[in-house]
Amino acid sequence: MIHDGRFGRFGGFYVAEPLLPALEALEQAWLDAREDSDFQATFRALLSDYAGRPTPLYRSPALSETLGCTVYLKREDLLHGGAHKTNNTLGQGLLARKMGCRRLIAETGAGQHGVATAMVGALLGLEVRVFMGALDVARQAPNVQRMQLFGAEVVPVEAGARSLKDAINEAMRYWTEHIRDTFYVFGTAAGPHPYPSIVRDFQRVIGEEIRREVLARHGRLPTAVLACVGGGSNAIGAFAPFLDDAEVALIGVEPGGEGLDSGKHGATLSRGELGCVHGSLSLLLQDSHGQVQEAHSISAGLDYPGVGPEHAHLRQTGRAIYDSATDDEALRAFAWLCRSEGILPALESSHAVAAALRLTERFDSDDVVVINLSGRGDKDLAHAMSALEARR
Ligand SMILES: *Cc1c(COP(=O)(O)O)cnc(C)c1O
């Protein structure tokens, strides 16, 4: 490897020996692609013509009134596919093609990353195999159908708890046996180096657009940027272009589940401990025996037990701060945004809105706050309606 993939003490690549050549080849392809103007032009063209970038930066009257300053929603919910995940799978699909791989594999929990990978496989003419916990296959029928319509094979994983963690392990195992012709499309800014950096690079378009648009409208940078954090990809994409601008507050919002003291949450950065999961050293939810603990959240996309190593580092250095929102708060924010703006946010994104709604005293009237609305909530409709009903 050319880089050690460290963010402070976090990151690195803790994988079985047979995977090292694959990660080395991936690192080389990524470093080449960064300098390759043809690659970058193709990526930019697909982002705009296929996926619909730039996404709007929408001034929300309701949020602006509530917070007493200018509040924008970065509308990743309007991206093709319904969430920011498309940025990453398009980039990694192009990397796969550049490396001459004919097959994409991916892990998926709720199915969103699987669908985004299947979509790009169909677009680029690559075979796709998606590993999905058997329990998730049963729970997420519409996403399984989408993947199959896009031509992907969905492989149910019967091991362990039959959910996301097991699907990742299975995908890694399959990759080890097929490294010659197979590209592993990782779904978030975690995993072994170089994935956290690759995913950040493909998602940073979110932050670049925020930066450009806020500068154009206000002649200054935003006061704060908020984003929800599962593994951390939409947040790191929104934060990355501002890391050197100390005046911009970067606020990540984790799933507080049923409350941080309930033991049923996914607040990895607030409550996790140093540990190694999926090939990288980061913060991680563990039980008293050091076993990886399941994360809990009302939003399936946030219940990843680990978090990307760059976020662990940004928290340690204090460059970003991390807050959490509970299931109840996220649901209330979800319903509130629907009613006040006619925008149906993903439950994941609703965590960022919920945390913002708590910051009513924090901002001055000329401050500019941006909330990354990572995705749309159509996928959450049934779940959110029954949860709202149960709370009445
Ligand atoms: C997957 C997903 C997330 C969580 O993933 P990150 O890698 O933390 O961004 C957040 N929002 C939406 C809409 C998602 O689909």
Image (cartoon, helix red, strand yellow):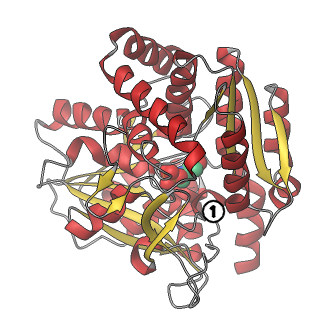
Assess disc 1: are there few (<14), some (14-19) or many (≥20) residues with their C-alpha within 10 Å of its C-alpha.
many
Question: 39 or 346: nearer the eye?
Answer: 39
Q: Residue at x 60, y 75 (%)?
A: 292
Relative image position of residue 238 (x, y in whole percent) = 34, 45
Q: Residue at x 84, y 28 (%)?
A: 149
Relative image position of residue 155 (x, y in whole percent) = 84, 44
Q: Amino acid at mark 1?
A: Ser
Furthest toward the front, the residue is 17
Relative image position of residue 380 (x, y in whole percent) = 70, 55
Question: 61 or 261: nearer the eye?
Answer: 261
Residue 312 appears left or right of 186: left
Relative image position of residue 94 (x, y in whole percent) = 53, 20
Instruction: Using the rendered image of the protein, determine whether residue 343 is visible from the camera's viewpoint.
Output: no
| Disc 1 target residue | 299
| Mark 1 C-beta to ligand 1 under 8 Å | yes
Q: Residue at x 70, y 14 (%)?
A: 125
Q: Is residue 78 above or below residue 317?
A: above
Q: Is residue 177 above or below residue 5?
A: above
Q: Quadrant of the C terminus?
A: bottom right
